[in-house]
Amino acid sequence: MLGFLIVVFFVAVALLAPFLAHPTQRNPYLIPHEGYASDPRPPSPGHPFGTTEEQFDLYYGVIWGARTAFVVALTVVASAVAVALLLGSLSGFYGGWIDEIVMRVTDIFLAFPGLILAVVIVAVLGQNVRNAVIAIAAVEWPTYTRLLRGEFLRVRDMEYVQAARALGSGDLRIIARHVIPNTVYPLLILASLSLGGIVITFAALSFLGLGAPPGYADWGQLISLSHNWIAGIPGHALEFWYTLIVPGVAIFLFVLGWNLLGDAFRDIFDPRLQGSR
Amino acid sequence: MAVRMRGHRAVAIVAIAVLIGSLSTVTARGAGEPVKNPDTFVELQFGDVESLDPALAYDIYSYEPIWPNVYETLIMYSGASLDKFTPMLATEVPSLANGLISPDGLTYTFPIRKGVKFHDGSVMTPDDVRYSIQRFLLQDQAGGPAWLLLSPLLGVDSTRDDNGKIQITYADVARAVSVQGDAVVFRLKKPFAPFLTIIAAWTSVMPRAWAAAHGDWDGRPGTWQKYNNPKTPDRYAFNHMNGTGPFKLERWDQQAKEVTLVRHDAYWRIPASLGRVVIRSVPEFTTRRLQLQQGDADLVVAAPNQQTQLRGLPGTVIQDNLPQIAVQTLQFNYKINTEANPDAGSGRLDGAGVPPDFFADIHVRRAFAYAFDYAGNLSGAYAGKGVIPHGPIVQGLLGFDSTVPVYTTNRDKAIAEFKEAAGGKVWETGFKFTIPFTAGNTARQTGAQIVKDTIQALNPKFQIDSRPVQSSSLIQLLRSHKGTMYFLGWFADYPDPHDFAQPFLAANGYFPQRGSYRNPEADRLVDEAVSTADPAKRKAVYRQLSMIAYNDVPYLFLVQPVTYYTMRSWVHGWYYNPIFPGQYFYTITKR
């Protein structure tokens, strides 16, 4: 329930971004900044969350960063699910050499640590938001594909599938009407659980200078702008707390929300857990 | 199993406790603590070394260990002075009074000190001096420092002509630098007043036998051509050093970007107080600061706009507002190498890249000049510490002229210039490119942000990105002409306007070698200025050159900065000379 509320909150923030933080530039994802003074400034009436180095407004960055987070996470999940539906169903339903090829390819992708693979892909493609999304999607799809294939293996020999086949249904109809509806729930649970993780991966890429460019409304980018200031000034280690805490809390809540929601989905969708609740 | 688990846990808890304990003792350190590692001096930089060869290195990060720490020169700047000298490898500073400069000002005689030992134990001879200077002249990597001595001694800026063919003979060099008894004699083409200031920084001496034994030029007349214009890592001296200085090279870790020097105990003066010097490249500012705070570093270099985070650090002092004979610029590459160059995007004027000759268009350059926010850059990137220069000849040099006009921010003029560029095509289709900047140099990062903001605000089709690059990689990038638009600073090699006019405006100067700027009139005036003796006339020629720089706009002159160093208060004996590429560790003690 809490998870649901948090996610609804972020959805509202993302949808209402133009009203909460009025864009001043053509590209609303670019955070406005006044001047180029290097030192961050603490929260003040004009800047409720303060500013980062080079005076990017944190409030604006957090609000529009919610949109970036959704755009990135949903795009990655959507493309990973799409790939999984295609390759996972082919592989799981038909088995044989198709299965072998698809599974060995996923093995290759899974053999690399996710973030490292994403870094390599972005480094090759060049740094921008689109390429970072492509990179994360390339890291994510094998998990989805394997999961769906496993579910397919379980379901494809079920009696209702055999019944459908006996009644003369084509492969496509069996997959679309009978198998997918009975296999897709674990995918949804995985998707909701991994939405948070994707945002963290994207933030990590931005922090490393491989995701969003400086000044782009993205939480990871905001944290990257804070990294010179984490240690504060001599004697006042927490002098610039807002540069780190503000975007950090945004990421924390976002990820927490999706994780709680994912757990809730699992409880609802997974019939085997029904008794244990 | 369970017992073992518990055992592991106990070990882990003890380990964590020890870790926390050690952390708290470390953080408890502060002012008044005993000196940490009294024998070792650690300097943290954001730049790193590209080459350790004194005849080749031509950036301040590479030159810091070379001079005056490992290699030494015939004479040296006396303390912080820029016009007084003390003898080093020579026993006397030549002057008209002591007869070591001939009355016509063309012959300089340096009696060479006896009994000076190189780091390998061999004894320095006048022939080693002759060899080292000739090697400096003849090796002459394109865009390297050889011109500094070629220009006064041979009257040319390069051993090669414009087509890359060798234009000098060994006889020319032998005539210019020769051994006479115990002395080395220099013969100039024309009288050149600042000659001693060049000698004081650019005559590093290495042993001939050592170099020749490791595949370098053997010092003989017939063989030098094949050692001309080498690639950076070609020579043994690229990563090995053998000088006479107070420190010898222990290790250059190219992976860790760290140079370690150890004391030369057979030094010809009293050996240095420090036993070991470590110069490490740490692009991450917070790491640099914390190491200084813990006393693990003794001196850190930081960008001007990071000073607020260093001020008031317990147990440290800031040496602030140190004047620099230097200028920070934003430069255009007239001929971008677009091959395998992601910074240039598509390599065409199609809205997704820039063509090779993009910046060869004067309207494009002027547009950038009018768009840039100079005041914002000075106050943001340099925390207001510095002045906006009037062209390449900076304050403190002969020929500085505050009546030379400067570009000021003017949005309308910038738009008008962009609309004229490439017959209007630039404005119509737009462009996209990436500015590489030195990683860790936040001043340049801010500068890149200013370019990005000001240009992108003019037209939605204009797209500029920036990316951090390690300083040694940036140097290599620019040498292969892959830079698009980039920030570079120039630090005086010696305090004379020729050292600014030539590198900026002569076709074979340091920057035109990288950015392909050409103006025959500027070439002529650079030569004229350096061979003019009358200061008033010389000044007038430098004004003309500054006007050419204003009209051609090959560079935006952003700031003549002042600099600062932050060091532990246990550092004593440190002093500053604007010509030093970095620190002179010989005089430093820790107590």
Image: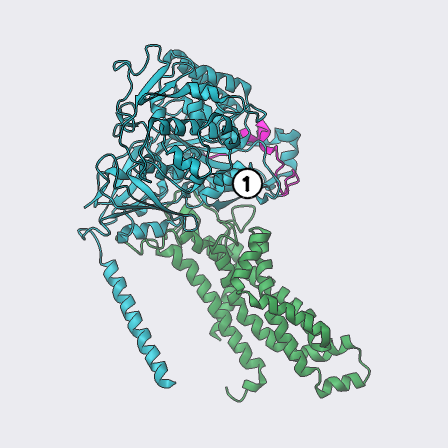
Residue A98 seen in the current view: yes
Q: Quadrant location of residue A156?
A: bottom right
Please give the residue where the numbered disc 1 appears in the rendered image.
B456
Residue drawn at x 65%, y 72% as measured from the top left: A103
Name the amino acid type tagged 1: Gln
Q: Nearer the viewer, residue B420 or B36?
A: B36
Q: Chain of mark 1?
A: B
Compared to residue B586, the image places residue A190 above or below, namely below
Question: x, y percentage for residue B278?
Answer: 32, 47
Residue drawn at x 52%, y 53% as measured from the top left: A210
The magenta stretch is B346-373
Residue furthest to the right in view is: A168
Question: x, y percentage for residue B339?
Answer: 62, 41
Question: x, y percentage for residue A222?
Answer: 45, 54
Compared to residue A163, the image places residue B368 above or below, namely above
Question: x, y percentage for residue A23?
Answer: 52, 49
Residue B367, magenta (yes or no) = yes
Q: Nearer the viewer, residue A151 or B29?
A: B29
Residue drawn at x 47%, y 37% as measured from the top left: B487
Colour green maps to chain: A
Residue B407 seen in the current view: no
Judged left or right of residue A200, residue A186 is right
Residue drawn at x 59%, y 71% as measured from the top left: A143
Colour cyan maps to chain: B
Residue B442, magenta (yes or no) = no
